[in-house]
Amino acid sequence: MIYLPIIIKAKKNQSTGDIIRQFKKASASAGTVQIVKDRRYFAKPSRIKADLTAERSRLKKRARSLKNRKNVSPAALVRINQRLGA
């Protein structure tokens, strides 16, 4: 996995709080915070695999339940299928 640096360019009339808020948003979208939290403690490979399997089964169950409902946007199903990797 390749990690790219997060670059935030300040504009003339931008306050420090705005720049910090922009950096937090960029780091959250890059997933940096989640990666650090995941690496905080050692996780056995079998535990990682079990977690991924459980998440996939939850997403499949959610997709099935959404298909049976009437007023569900197609975009919701597309997002779930993207997370499943289908």
Image: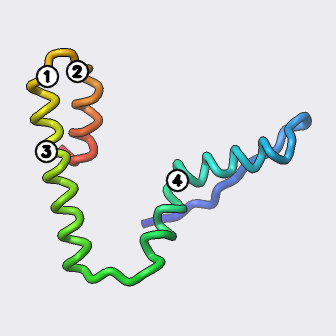
Q: Amino acid at mark 3?
A: Lys
**Residue in view at x 27 percent, y 46 percent:** 83
Instruction: Return the mark for residue 30.
Output: 4
Instruction: Give the Cα separation between the discs numbered 3 and 4.
Output: 25 Å
Q: Residue furthest right?
A: 12
Tell me whether the residue at label 2 lies in contact with that at label 4, contact meaning CB atoms closer than 8 angstroms.
Answer: no
Q: Point out the frontmost of discs 3 and 4.
A: 3
Instruction: Give the Cα separation between the discs numbered 1 and 4.
Output: 33 Å
Task: Please tell me which residue lies in front, 8 or 68.
Answer: 68
The mark that comes first in sequence, 3 or 4, is 4
The residue that label 3 is drawn on is 60
Q: Secondary structure at mark 2?
A: loop
Q: Amino acid at mark 1?
A: Arg
Quarter of the image where one finds residue 51: bottom left
Quarter of the image where one finds residue 82: top left
Instruction: Return the mark for residue 69.
Output: 1
The residue that label 2 is drawn on is 72
Tell me whether the residue at label 2 lies in contact with that at label 1, contact meaning CB atoms closer than 8 angstroms.
Answer: yes
Q: Quadrant of the C terminus?
A: top left
Instruction: Give the Cα separation between the discs numbered 2 and 4.
Output: 29 Å
